[in-house]
Image (cartoon, rainbow, N blue to C red):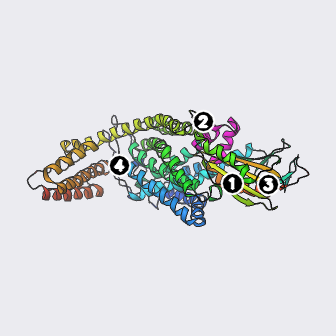
Amino acid sequence: MSTPAAFVAPRTRSAFDPRSLVFWVGVGLLIYGIVQAGSHVAISLLSAPVPGAFALLLWSGYAAAVLALIQRFAAFERRPALSIAMAFVWGGFIATGIGTVAAPAAHSIAADLVGADNGWATAIGAGAVEEPLKMLGLVALALIPGARIRSAADGLFYGAIIGLGFEVVESFLYSTQWEVSGTSFSTIVLYLFLRGFVGGLASHPTYSAIAGAGVGYFFGSTASAIKRWAVMLGTLLLAIVLHIFFDSPLLEFDNPLPSTAIKSIPVIILALIIVRIVRGKQRKALEAGARDVVPDELVSPADFESLRTRKARKQAVKAMKKEHGRKAARALTGVQRAQLDLLVSALDDGMESVEARAAWQRLYDAQQGLREHMPTAATG
Amino acid sequence: MFLAETGPTGRIPLAIRLVGRNGVAGAVIVGLIALVYLVGIPALDAALRGPAIDASRVTSSSGISVVPPEGWAYDPDSETFQVFTQAGATIIVAPALPSDGTLEEAVAPTQEQLASDEGGQWVVSEPQYFTTRAGDRAVLLAAQNPTDAQLLWIVEHEGWHVRVVMNAPAASLETAFGSAQELVESMRIQPGGAP
């Protein structure tokens, strides 16, 4: 495995870096996005407070649930909450705000090419604008070293968050155009069902995660420039094509559910392939970290076997619960978390870094806790 | 977290090369790409469109006059239908037709048709009634799906019904709706001019 030539710590621990000009460009675009998209959100809430609050509650709950799902898929690494929030805000306000200007114009241009009544015009207009705009947010984050977007896995994660922000704010706005749709609670619920669940996994978070994996690879890989550019632009193109395909009039049936389900298949398969490749590489990196970087008394290669998959971690916790009870099982979960944090910190910043030392301390505390609940067993 | 590579290449990842920098080049790149979407694409669209109509009121041969929405292109080719376009949205004002029924009866078939069109995934709102500036009763029916919106207005004037239809991508509905509603509210129907 090739590791960075030198461990150089970024000056911040998240994407919040006021000394970076990229940060300030992002702030400028956020102000624009708030004026464009945020003002619509505010108007929706002020003009009809009860249904507005109801829609906000529903979409916030949806965002929280999907965020938890994304976090679950990213169990190896815990990312800073501030960076996650900034990614969400880019998708929710900056990409949405710019999209309100660019997407209709792109639709209009596409309509010139394929005809105004052609369903492809909407699909092309949305895909060609929204995907690059969401990816731009990830590029901006990656240009701030504190965001630590250093691999396809990081790009995949933050891409999904940006896509989630976009989907939630856009859907909230669509469901609260009171002048058009009336202040109907059933309309709001129908919209949540249609955009949140019928679209299912084949939606903004998935497309952005695919494009994001390419951005993460571009910033973290030591491959040749040609290969890195090809991967980044290739994943963007793939995201655009999938988005256009999903919105296109292809495979439309009387009942939308089979149509949506069939269209979701290639999107989900491709996303799962990318997730599988990325997670395989993550495992390989962590395995090498347990073998070569972190001392065996903290995380040995044998320890990593029980950390390798969620199933392995759960099985270890289950066995601990059976043998030593619930508290010991909970303590083992803490040990596993601290071991993974230590591996990630050691690989990213070196064993002597502040982050690795903090993870080391957490691991020590967690191991102490575990010993208290299973005094006769060795805890590594 | 850095991931495993196939072998040492001697290259340093961009993520590490950026550490300690102020990001001037990155800021310029992000800003320029954002400008392409904020200014470039709308400018290209405007260049491809016909010039926006500059008239205080447009009257069709069937006797319907409306104040054209600002910034919308007008298709002067059709004498009976008035067609306005902007940013992917199209507004069509149809000729007046005689009708004995009420607005409620007039809008019901379209409402039922959209609601029963399962393939379209339309979320159909309840009809909303209002009065135009000329004092005519009117109704708005809106339907949206994840990508598109279809809006129908019917204006009633002394036994005549005028239908206005707008198709728009969902993304531009927010801005297009205001213009379309203004157009409908500005409508004047001259019974003598109607067929």
Number of the label disc, if any, that sits on residue A168: none
Task: Give the spatial CA distance, label 4 vs label 3.
Answer: 57 Å
Disc 2 and disc 4 in contact, CB within 8 angstroms: no
Q: Residue at x 75, y 58 (%)?
A: B182
- Relative placement, left or right, of A102 versus A88 is right
Amino acid type, callout 3: Glu
Amino acid type, callout 4: Arg
Secondary structure category for the residue under label 2? loop
- Disc 1 crowd rating (10 Å Cα; few below 14, some 14-19, many 20+) is many
Number of the label disc, if any, that sits on residue A249: 2
Q: Nearer the viewer, residue A337 or B88?
A: B88
Residue labelled with disc 4: A72
From which residue to which does the magenta span run? A103-127
The main secondary structure of the magenta stretch is helix
Pointer 3 indicates a residue of which chain? Answer: B
Q: Is residue A94 visible?
A: no
Given this view, does label 4 or label 3 mark the residue nearer the observer? Answer: 3
Task: Give the spatial CA distance, label 1 vs label 2.
Answer: 24 Å
Task: Give the spatial CA distance, label 3 vs label 1.
Answer: 20 Å
Q: Is residue B132 visible?
A: yes
Q: Nearer the viewer, residue A5 or A79?
A: A79
Disc 4 and disc 1 in contact, CB within 8 angstroms: no
Pointer 4 indicates a residue of which chain? Answer: A
Number of the label disc, if any, that sits on residue B156: 3
Q: Residue at x 69, y 54 (%)?
A: B177
Asked whether residue A60 is drawn in magenta, I would say: no
Number of the label disc, if any, that sits on residue B177: 1
Extreme-left residue of the structure: A376
Q: Are marks 3 and 2 on the same chain?
A: no
